[in-house]
Amino acid sequence: MDNIFLRFKNNKTLRNGTLFSMFAFINRGIAFLLMVILARYIMPGEYGQLSLFNTITQLLAYFITLSCQSFFTISYFQRKGELFRQDFTSIILITTGTTLLLSIVLFFFQDSLARFADLPPAFLWFAIIICVGEEIFGLLMSYIRIQEKVIRYGILSCGFAIINFIISIYLVVYKGLDWRGRVYTHLCVAVLSGLLGLGVLASKHFFTRHVTWEGTKNVLKWGVPLIPHNAAGWIKQGCDRFIINSNHSLAAVGIFSFALNLNSIIAMVGIAFNQTNSVTIYQLLSSDKTANDKLFLLKRQTKNIGLIYTISYVSILVLGTLLVYFAIPAYCTSLPYFWILSLSGYLNCLYYLFVNYLYYFHRNKNVMTITFTTALLHLMMSLLLTKYSLYWTAIIYVVTQGVVVYLTARQAIKVIRENYITK
């Protein structure tokens, strides 16, 4: 027992990853409790409407920063000092420019876009504001994460989760605003967190006037290829919601979306541990250790995190089933879909074991090619099979995610060999 405690204490990735996961579980637990409560006030049909709004917001998020926000972490480790500040300022300027462009488009075509999205025009403006606020807050959280201030990270993330919970209950339950109440809550939290993020980042003196077009172009060169990669998730889940709505019903959208939300708990574990695992990998790759030492440590790291993912997957599968069965019987019909989708959630966790190497060595185009082409494959299969049964839709998630993991692992092994074995 003492040996296990010492291993936990001395293994920074395991310790921080566990803390990140704990905070993520608290956040997800708050969200799950909220979902249980609101399930009595938001019926499957209205839940489908909310899912469509979230789909639009997710799509816009990919274009708000042109996927350049992820370069923040890479730049912090590789460029440092004034070059890092230039990259950060470029990311903010890119976000400002795309926000203005999207606002102009929406101003002139809001009625047509609202009809297409089946949402009130004002909600499209809400989606843009939400995206900007969340991206800025995301930069703050990335900074806290790479500083390994895990407790501060947890306080901020859990604090806003609690605020989200309180406002949602007030607007949905007490004010009777159904799915619109959730959107208003999302908007309030995004604005508050975005303002906080902007204020803290400015106080760190990350902004600089010495921004060059060459530097901004390098940021764009890194980020833009990831737009199709990031959009791959939207192509899968977003398009599926519209396809299900066309072939089945809005209630079916709600049931399947609920199963996807359950599955996201498994994916959340992958994201939580990757938040610290990626930092450890970048630190290790940037260190002065020998190639053999790096390979040994990387292999051990992958094995340990993979084991954690497996244990977490089995635990969540069992607990998620029991919770839905006893706490939300109205959504029990989503469980068979969840059981199938859970395999894709586990595979998504395994994907995080390999993709960081491609990011570090700037193989973003490889990542984009893998995820985007498999997303198109997913879309084509969904168009052909979803009309027959939602079980086929769930199976498609497993098949395509399995392809993503296989191809990403092959590319990661190749880039490691090129940089550490063949030299």
Image (tube, grey):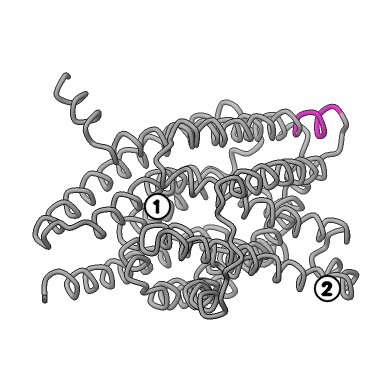
Instruction: Find residue 253 and report its image quarter.
Output: bottom right
Q: Position of residue 74 (x, y in %)?
A: 41, 61
Judge whether 283 appears above or below 162 on screen: below
To which residue does mark 1 refer?
Answer: 343
Q: First in sequence, mark 2 or 1: give its number.
A: 2
In the picture provided, is 10 more to the left or to the right than 160? left
Q: Residue at x 49, y 42 (%)?
A: 265
Q: Which residues are magenta?
A: 168-174
Query: Nearest the camera: 323 or 125?
Result: 125
In this orientation, does residue 377 appear?
A: no
Q: Label 1 sits on what residue type?
A: Leu
Amino acid on which disc 2 is placed = Ile
Residue 64 in sight: yes
Say if the magenta span includes residue 26: no
> From the image, which quarter does the C terminus lie in?
bottom left
Which residue carries the number 2 mark?
104
Helix, strand or loop at label 1? It is: helix
Using the image as rendered, state which of residue 183 and residue 240 is in the foreground: 183
Queried whether the magenta region covers residue 173, the answer comes back as: yes
| 330 relative to 167 in the view: left or right | left
Q: Is residue 241 left or right of residue 118?
A: left
Query: Which residue is most to the left?
Result: 292
Of discs 2 and 1, which sits in the foreground? 2
Q: Residues within 10 Å of mark 2 (few under 14, many from 20)?
A: few
Task: Name the element at disc 2.
Answer: helix
Residue placed most toward the observer, 380 or 204: 204
Magenta part, dominant SS: helix
**Circles 2 and 1: CB distance less than 8 Å?**
no
